Amino acid sequence: VSSIVTRRKEAIPLPLPRPIARWESDSRKWADAFPREYDRYRMMMESSTKTKYGGAFPRDYLEETPANVILFAGYAFAKDYLQARGHVYAIHDVTHTKRVNEKTPATCWTCKSTDVPRILAEMSPAEFYKQPFSAFKDQITHPIGCLDCHDPTTMRLTITRPALREALQRQGRDLENIPHQEMRTLVCAQCHVEYYFKGEGKYLTFPWDKGFRIEEIESYYDEAEFSDWTHAISQAPMVKLQHPDYEVYLTGIHAYRNIACADCHMPYRSEGGVKFTDHYIQSPLLNIANSCAVCHRWSEEEIRQRVESIQDKTKEVRQRVEETLCKAHFEVAAARQAGATDDELQNPRQLIRKAQLRWDFVAANNGMGFHSPGECLRILAAALDLASQARTELARILATHGVIKPIIYPDISTKTAAQQVEQSFVNGNPPNLLPK
Amino acid sequence: VSSIVTRRKEAIPLPLPRPIARWESDSRKWADAFPREYDRYRMMMESSTKTKYGGAFPRDYLEETPANVILFAGYAFAKDYLQARGHVYAIHDVTHTKRVNEKTPATCWTCKSTDVPRILAEMSPAEFYKQPFSAFKDQITHPIGCLDCHDPTTMRLTITRPALREALQRQGRDLENIPHQEMRTLVCAQCHVEYYFKGEGKYLTFPWDKGFRIEEIESYYDEAEFSDWTHAISQAPMVKLQHPDYEVYLTGIHAYRNIACADCHMPYRSEGGVKFTDHYIQSPLLNIANSCAVCHRWSEEEIRQRVESIQDKTKEVRQRVEETLCKAHFEVAAARQAGATDDELQNPRQLIRKAQLRWDFVAANNGMGFHSPGECLRILAAALDLASQARTELARILATHGVIKPIIYPDISTKTAAQQVEQSFVNGNPPNLLPK
Amino acid sequence: MNQAMQAAIASSRQFIRALLRLAWFPPGLRLLMFAVFGVCVGLGALAVHTSRAPSYLSDEPEVCVNCHVMRPEYVSWRHSSHAEVAHCNDCHVPHDSFVNHWLFKARDGLWHATVFTMRWEPQVIHLSERAVPVVESNCRRCHERLVACTSLREHTAGDLRCWDCHGDVPHGETRGLASSPGYLDPSLPPVGPRSKGVTIGGRPPR
Ligand SMILES: [Ca+2]
Ligand SMILES: [Ca+2]
């Protein structure tokens, strides 16, 4: 009897939350008012989960795909590049990656901590960004948490990061009237988006002024004559794309049907008769019943298989692009060794930039193509086409300089091998690529 | 009240069909028993409907995409290739196409008429197939109709074409125990499939013994050392793929969810309180409300847009492949003009065969990729990769023979221009492709 | 009436009276036993009242929302085209025979109550295998004339179920928690010893 009575009682809503301090960056302090959300949030400590292409374990992207080392030759991503894990690790991971050095700006903190909103309220974003990363090691200690997405007085979803506000404003969006369902995506779009550091002040900027599609982002960067680095092997002017999860998602069927990130990554959960949002953010494939089966009444196995079949296709085409691009980079280097001028190599380098930008849009995007299967494959096909055009042209350029046989492609079959090759180019003593 | 009573009366099951003759090939004779189905069937006379990529109007594929003429150079499809229209036109169209000549075998009748089942009951399939097409002009007069899909005594769906029965049997399927829902697809798979004429007897055969995927079909043909024709420009051994609608469909999400051809192309219709199968078979985009919107409760406009966005992607990548393939064909011809031997050209020709086979699997398939968006894009990407590999190799071969500048690609911007180029190759007086 | 019968009646009356007074036990224990028995009866009645067990005998949809886990289905059905024409049990309980009807109802009711009380309910509820043909036969029961001229008139292996096409009938396209707004919509009727009358979303049930 008592069980029946409690079960009926539990269906009554919680008392109103106790007040939370305006800049409370410690998520534990929010837990008194919202124990259910906090308990699930803490689950993100789990970092050993695995799915076929995702999960929270620290997959080494360079080991798994040594081609990455070649594609990022001369850039920090050739040193260290791991799969993301739960939000609670953000501080730990950004302070331990080899990608950070003395020259790293404070901008890199922006997406890693609940301390950032407070700091940004104290100083202007421009001031914050231009300082060195190391200047904030003491003030920034709390990983991503409640304050990043919630207003502590009303608990409403809110955009705390200026870069997103600014980008949306430049598009003419009225930030006061964003539909609630869209907010359930936009809180993620504060961080899970492509960005670049604009100008000397390293001002965090999202390249969306012409639109969200890769062709529009490309033309934004082209117009700004922006590049992140010069490729160590091919000397092409490269752009790195980072986790354009939001941009890719926008082109998919789920965005078309107005389904938000939170619908899949934070599905509703019921505990003791209370319905709440699951704050254990992770791969939905680890929680298919709650996240997908709400709309797709198939068995979990069927859902997983369908997702993996989409991901397998993306992976297959991605690999084709990676092979072609790696060869193209080496062929430019070989053409230089054979005596080709920068003028002759101008066009192939532009083609390589265009191709790799497209490849990276898909590769850096999480979910191995699932967020928008058709668009990802279309973009990869375009990348393949452009990279192949570069190769055909390079074959002719090489021939002009007397090289007709295939060039010697160095061994890049493991991370170590690839990093050796990469370093040899970075240090200015590349191997001979010309056949006898 | 009287209205309700009449509506109820209407809904009472139709009287048992009057007996229909065993080989009744005239669909009009079935109309007495099934007026609703026949009336809708007659609607297929409409042949002016248009959708973005489909519809029943006689779209000229050669005019719309002159590249087709080059890709099919030396084969009948370079002469005449139109978009399909309704079943009732099957006899008219097969007797008016320029693809038919004195050497055409009777096999071509197989999928065009209700007279075929009767003839096949009178003589064995092997005997039928090996006769000339012209031998049956008088006996075959009724276009595709009721007898092709229904058993006239029970009205149950039935497979009337031996090629499908044989192909399924070779796969070990038990033809007596096919689930009903699958029959709603298999009646279409009698015709809407890839086929070839096996051996001297022109025996109609479906190349599925290793499986339905393009890689498996390819390996079937490779093992049989089969080719339909030798390409007039590149001399590559080619295979033509014809309308592999069923094979492509099998890899899509709808097949995965057990949705049949008939569910989209013959959706239920209700008239006067009776629900029946709509026998006006056409593009579902001309009947979105009944065919898609029952499962997808979106507006018609949203459904159409989503389909077209899938089709646009397919079209974009298809075009990339077409451009690359056309260039590859010409480059082989140029290499021959420059003195390359068949030995040297062996590998590029094989790559071209493989690439075009993949391209055709998607291009010959109806629906511009809709039936399986991801798979179609994956296959096109593979085609692009293979064709590009051929081109890179050809650039080296051309260079070996002293040709370093880009070759001269003939003008193929219109159907007429392309057909002139094609004919010049067929007649043995091709234009000079070598640059000065 | 003969003597023997009168004697028999008298002796059984005596026996019942003794039984009711627990005549075989010592008086102290008698009192205690009365008290325990009373509490049991009281608790039992409370349980029956709280869980609205008798309502299981009725066909009112409000019965189902006695358990909050049925709320999403209730809400989605309430807003569906079937809300006015078919109640839960029109679809979820067999209507082919009286016996089947009550057997199924009893079995499902007991099972659901057990699952609920034991907190065994899954995060996402699906139709059980047993329930699928029941629901479909009920679709056909109402719509049989409509589908009589097509192959839908019978269900053969591998066929689509009615709701493979009519996926939104009657529970909508999105299921489970995601389909009901807020925690409590509609709010559960108050329960317990002092609660009066049943209300659903502030109004009495039909
Ligand atoms: Ca970037
Ligand atoms: Ca063929």
Image (cartoon, coloured by chain):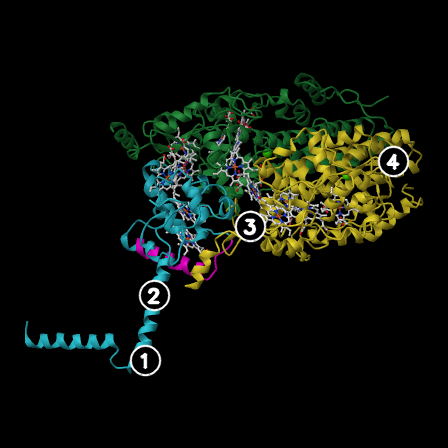
Chain colours: A yellow, B green, C cyan
Q: Chain of mark 1?
A: C
Disc 1 residue type?
Answer: Leu
Residues at marks 2 and 4, CA–CA distance in whole angstroms: 98 Å
Q: Nearer the viewer, residue B311 or C142?
A: C142
Callout 2–callout 3 Cβ contact below 8 Å: no
First-in-chain label (1 vs 2)? 1
Residue under the image location 90 percent in, 41 percent down: A434
User: Label 1 vs label 2: CA separation?
Assistant: 20 Å
Decide if residue A94 is in sight here.
Answer: yes
Q: Which residue is mark 3?
A: A16
Q: Is residue A143 left or right of residue C60?
A: right
Rate crowding at label 2 as few (under 14), some (14 to 19) or many (20 or more) other CA atoms within 10 Å.
few
The quadrant in which residue A132 appears is top right
- Same chain letter for marks 3 and 1: no
Same subunit, tags 1 and 2? yes
Badge 2 is on which residue?
Answer: C42
Residue holding disc 1: C29
Image quarter where the C terminus of chain A lies is: top right
> Which is in the foreground here, disc 3 or disc 4?
3
Mark pair 3, 1: CA separation: 51 Å
Give, as a single range, the part of the protein colored magenta.
Answer: C101-123
Pointer 4 local density, CA inside 10 Å: few below 14, some 14–19, many at least 20: many
Question: Is C6 located above or below residue B287 in the figure?
Answer: below
Q: Nearer the viewer, residue C104 or A392?
A: C104
Residue B164 x, y percent position in the rendering: 50, 39
